[in-house]
Image (tube, grey):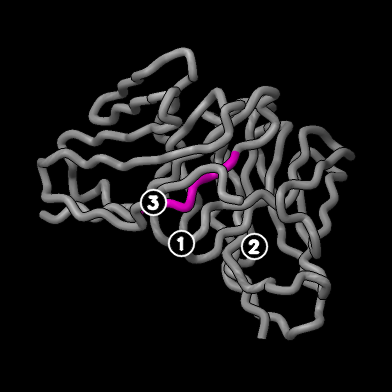
């Protein structure tokens, strides 16, 4: 089955620790995205990548880092510099510039204690 | 600065009636719009889209209307079904199609 997987579904970390969220897709999509969802707010774009070894900052990239060493994988690191890291994080992929074919993963809820 | 706004955080509709979800945007460069549906603890799924060269797009029970002069779009669901209960996000793309900007979402509850 083709799709996007994110792991883990729930993640708890102590304040000041970096944490990496996994995102894997087997849809052969070139583009991948990380969004953050907070209560009462829309999905906000953190980072996106349209091709391996290249990525761009989204609207709220501060305190986050990504890598795109493989087409299938786009891990997101939430660093200690991110002031409000507790949120629901969604990864997505699509053919480049085809958002009506954008598929989302199930999400990871990160709670920083 | 929220460029895509959904001013109604929630909406309740009786089963069989019409659901109308509204979305306003401020960026006149947006030229493609999408609606996504999201169930709790799941990622959003694409529902329907519309290009700025059209004012209406229909797919089964779902119709999206675009009023460019008012910078407003709406999603109509007719007839509404209990399985439609979810959070609906509108989203917009500007030229270049590199990224999508999402609205704040409207939680629809369809009452049996």
Instruction: Name the residue carrying label 1.
Output: B41
Q: Seen in the image, is B53 located left or right of residue A19?
A: left
Per the model, the C-alpha gap separating discs 1 and 3 is 23 Å
Give the image quarter of residue A36: bottom right
Percent x, y of residue B22: 34, 41
At x 50%, y 51%, the residue is B43
At x 25%, y 40%, the residue is B20
Query: Which quadrant holds the C terminus of chain B?
Result: bottom left
Percent x, y of residue A17: 81, 79
Choose mark 2 or mark 1, whichever is in front.
1
Instruction: Name the residue carrying label 2.
Output: A7
At x 53%, y 37%, the residue is B26
Percent x, y of residue A73: 76, 47
For residue A85, above or below residue A15:
above
- Which chain is disc 3 placed on? B
Percent x, y of residue B52: 49, 19
**Residue most extreme to the front:** B69
Q: Seen in the image, is B24 located left or right of residue A54?
A: left
Choose mark 3 or mark 2, whichever is in front.
3
10 Å crowding of disc 2: few (<14), some (14-19), many (20+): some
Give the image quarter of residue A21: bottom right
Circle 1 — which element? loop
Give the residues drawn in magenta, as a range. B101-106
Q: In the image, which disc is placed on residue B7?
A: 3
- Which chain is disc 2 placed on? A
Per the model, the C-alpha gap separating discs 3 and 2 is 33 Å
Of B2 and A97, nearer the camera is: B2
Residue B102 on the magenta segment: yes
Q: Earlier in the sequence, mark 1 or mark 3?
A: 3
């Amino acid at each position: 089955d083709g799709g996007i997987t994110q792991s883990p579904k729930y993640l708890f970390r102590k304040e000041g620790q970096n944490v990496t969220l996994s995102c894997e897709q087997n849809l052969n999509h070139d583009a991948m995205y990380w969004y953050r969802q907070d209560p009462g707010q829309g999905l906000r774009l953190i980072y996106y990548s349209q091709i391996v070894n290249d990525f761009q900052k989204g609207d709220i990239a501060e305190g986050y880092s990504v890598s795109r060493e493989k087409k299938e994988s786009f891990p997101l690191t939430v660093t200690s510099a991110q002031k409000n890291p507790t949120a629901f994080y969604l990864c997505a992929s699509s053919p480049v510039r085809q958002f009506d074919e954008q598929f989302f993963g199930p999400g990871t809820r990160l709670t920083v204690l | 600065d929220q460029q895509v706004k959904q001013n109604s955080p929630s909406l309740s509709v009786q089963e069989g009636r019409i659901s109308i979800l509204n979305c306003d945007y401020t960026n006149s460069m947006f030229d493609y719009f999408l609606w996504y549906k999201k169930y709790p603890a799941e990622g959003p799924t694409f529902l329907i889209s519309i290009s700025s060269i059209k004012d209406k797009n229909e797919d089964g029970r779902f119709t999206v209307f675009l009023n460019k002069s008012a910078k407003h779009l709406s999603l109509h669901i007719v007839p509404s079904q209990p399985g439609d209960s979810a959070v609906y996000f509108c989203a917009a793309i500007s030229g270049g199609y590199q990224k999508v900007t999402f609205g704040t979402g409207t939680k629809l509850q369809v009452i049996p």
